[in-house]
Image: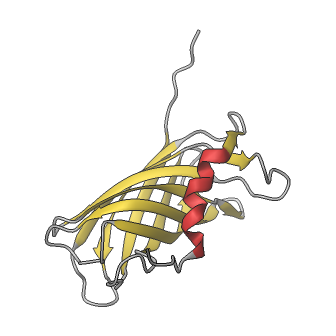
Amino acid sequence: MKRLRDPLFVLPLLGLLAAPLGAEEPASIAAGIGEVEPIVDGAGVELAWEVRFAPRRFHLLSHFAPKLSPIAGALATSRGALYAYAGLRWDLPLGEHWTLSPSWALGLYHREDGQDLGGPIEFRSGLELAYRLDARSLLGISLYHLSNGGLFDNNPGSESLLFLYSTHLRMRSRR
């Protein structure tokens, strides 16, 4: 088996070791639309969905590690490509209304007529800049990269640019 060239591949797996912080921030759901390979040739339209769980801290690194939010998502392109993933994101507030969020994930890719990314296992690393519209919702732009990290002989990678809307999930209280 080839040696993995991307050391960030372990970050999504660390989410399993995380402990909840409590009800400080609720979970949210995001939906987005954008373009695959916007810089190169515009390889199609993409629709994306993501569930963002409440931030958590790691047991082993609780005093050093930031709060990270586990994420799970899926995307579909106009060329039939599908990708489902799970990982982590880190929300960094930039003042009262702005948030910068890097994210890392591991997922399964099915190409259909989409790009040949080398194999079914793909790593996702991205960056999102979002503006808080109100206490419950954000509007943002996200750029992310898909790569198999050298697991397969072919590793062309792919970028996508998305416009996203996210809102907190309402949880019913038990009484």
Tell me which corner region of the image, top left, top right, bottom left or bottom right, holds residue 173: top right
Residue drawn at 30 percent across, 72 percent down: 119
Tell me which corner region of the image, top left, top right, bottom left or bottom right, holds residue 6: bottom right
Most extreme residue toward the right, as rendered?
63
Q: Position of residue 138 (x, y in %)?
A: 51, 55
Residue drawn at 51 percent across, 76 percent down: 4
Residue drawn at 70 percent across, 40 percent down: 19
Residue drawn at 62 percent across, 54 percent down: 14
Most extreme residue toward the front, as rendered?
1
Q: Position of residue 5 (x, y in %)?
A: 53, 80
Q: Position of residue 13 (x, y in %)?
A: 57, 55
Q: How many marks?
A: 0
Given residues 99 and 96, the one toward you in this image is: 99
Given residues 111 and 132, the one toward you in this image is: 111
Given residues 153 and 22, the one toward you in this image is: 153
Asked if residue 100 can be seen in this view, the reply is yes
- Horizontal side, residue 82 vs residue 49: left or right: left
The answer to whether residue 135 is above or below residue 132 is above
Q: Quadrant of the image for the C terminus?
A: top right
The answer to whether residue 45 is above or below residue 43 is above
Q: Position of residue 104 (x, y in %)?
A: 53, 65
Q: Quadrant of the image for the N terminus?
A: bottom left
Most extreme residue toward the bottom, as rendered?
40
Asked if residue 49 can be seen in this view, the reply is no
- Horizontal side, residue 121 vs residue 23: left or right: left
- What coloring was used for the rendering? secondary structure
